[in-house]
Image: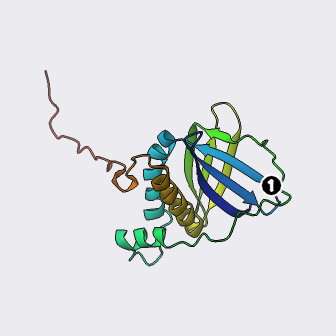
Amino acid sequence: MQIKQLQVNFDAREDRLMLRIATAERDEIAVALTRRLIKVLWPFLQRMLEGHLAAESGTETEETLQATLGAGSFSEPFDEDDLSHPLGTDPVLAMESRLQPIDGPACRIMLGEIRGRQVSFDCDRDLLEALCAMIQATVEQADWDLDLAALALPEPTVVEPDASPTLH
């Protein structure tokens, strides 16, 4: 799926973020993102930006990343003309997600219902930064009391093998 346009807005009635994806083939796919899913997915999106999709120069700091996330311009309205809806007009309620690094460097984001409709799309660094900026701005608008900056994956712990085993 070649993405032409993304939009994230807040649906107050449903208390969900609505991700709309328009493709170059003039398809629209809508995905409902819950607070719970954003809370779990956000640290992995950030790790993907800082790891697999990190700037090649390797000099990007956390401050630079945050400035980039907040610097996007989203003034172009979502083009709704003549879009087809291959998964139906009701949004996919994302209850599970997967994030996978792929060659490019890029990543594949998979969102879907449990044993139901699934959406999968690929992002390069620029597209993922734009998506993260939209999510961040919309979470603030939603007033979910969700501090995305405070959400972090725990650092993996490395267990050093002990030379002498403990016997009981």
Quadrant for the C terminus in the image: top left
The residue shown at (83%, 56%) is 83
For label 1, the residue is 27
Residue 40 placement, left or right of 166: right
**Residue 5, quarter of picture:** bottom right
Residue 148 placement, left or right of 132: left
The residue shown at (57%, 70%) is 126
**Residue 12, quarter of picture:** top right
- SS assignment at label 1: loop
Q: Position of residue 162 (x, y in %)?
A: 18, 40
Whether residue 73 is situated above or below residue 5 in the rendered picture: below
Q: Position of residue 52 (x, y in %)?
A: 49, 62
Q: Can residue 17 be seen in this view?
A: yes
Q: Position of residue 144 (x, y in %)?
A: 44, 46
Residue at far top of view? 168
Of the pair 6 and 54, the residue shown nearer to us: 6
Whether residue 50 is situated above or below residue 37 in the rendered picture: below
Residue 158 placement, left or right of 131: left
Residue 137 placement, left or right of 127: left
Q: Position of residue 19 (x, y in %)?
A: 63, 52
Q: Is residue 1 visible?
A: no
Q: What is the three-letter code of the residue carrying label 1?
A: Asp
